[in-house]
Image (cartoon, rainbow, N blue to C red):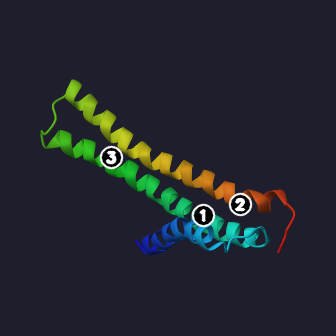
Amino acid sequence: MAAVGAATFANQVVMWLPLIGMFTGMITPAHYYTWAMCMAAAWGVIMLFNLVTLPVEFDASARAKVILGKMGFIQQGEEADGVNKVLNAAALTYVAAFITSLAYFLYYLLPFLLGGRRND
């Protein structure tokens, strides 16, 4: 729960920073590395939050399958298979979110990893 605040702030940064830069012209080639570092840091926080929530979601899906079966809400066979597929797909959306945030993190971190030319 402590990471929710940091992840919420990071989500705001990755949403508003590019818009502010685009509409104000503040993000110039001279300031690109500073901008990219802010974006990489924000995406890193989001990526870590997504990584932490992965086991929680997989556990929640597994527990839901057990509870639905024990309470008699689903019948064995085709209905249980359908519930398994839906809950597995729900858990895999968190994997997709993690992979996406990892890709954005690496994209904004790439100039630093490659040691490109600095303008500021």
Residue placed under numbered mark 1 in the picture: 44
Left or right: where 74 falls relative to 62: left
Q: Which label sits in the foreground, 2 or 3?
A: 2
Q: Nearer the viewer, residue 119 or 102?
A: 119
- Do residues under tags 1 and 3 come within 8 Å of each other at their CB atoms? no
Q: Nearer the viewer, residue 70 or 47?
A: 47
Q: Nearer the viewer, residue 101 or 49?
A: 101
As measured in the structure, the alpha-carbon distance from the residue carrying label 1 to the one carrying label 2 is 9 Å
Residue placed under numbered mark 3 in the picture: 61
Marked residue nearer the N-terminal end (1 or 2): 1
Label 1, residues with CA under 10 Å away: few <14, some 14-19, many ≥20:
many
Residue placed under numbered mark 2 in the picture: 109
Say which mark, if any, is on residue 108: none
Left or right: where 21 falls relative to 89: right
Residue displayed at 20% across by 29% down: 79
Q: Quadrant of residue 47?
A: bottom right
Residue displayed at 44% across by 58% down: 53
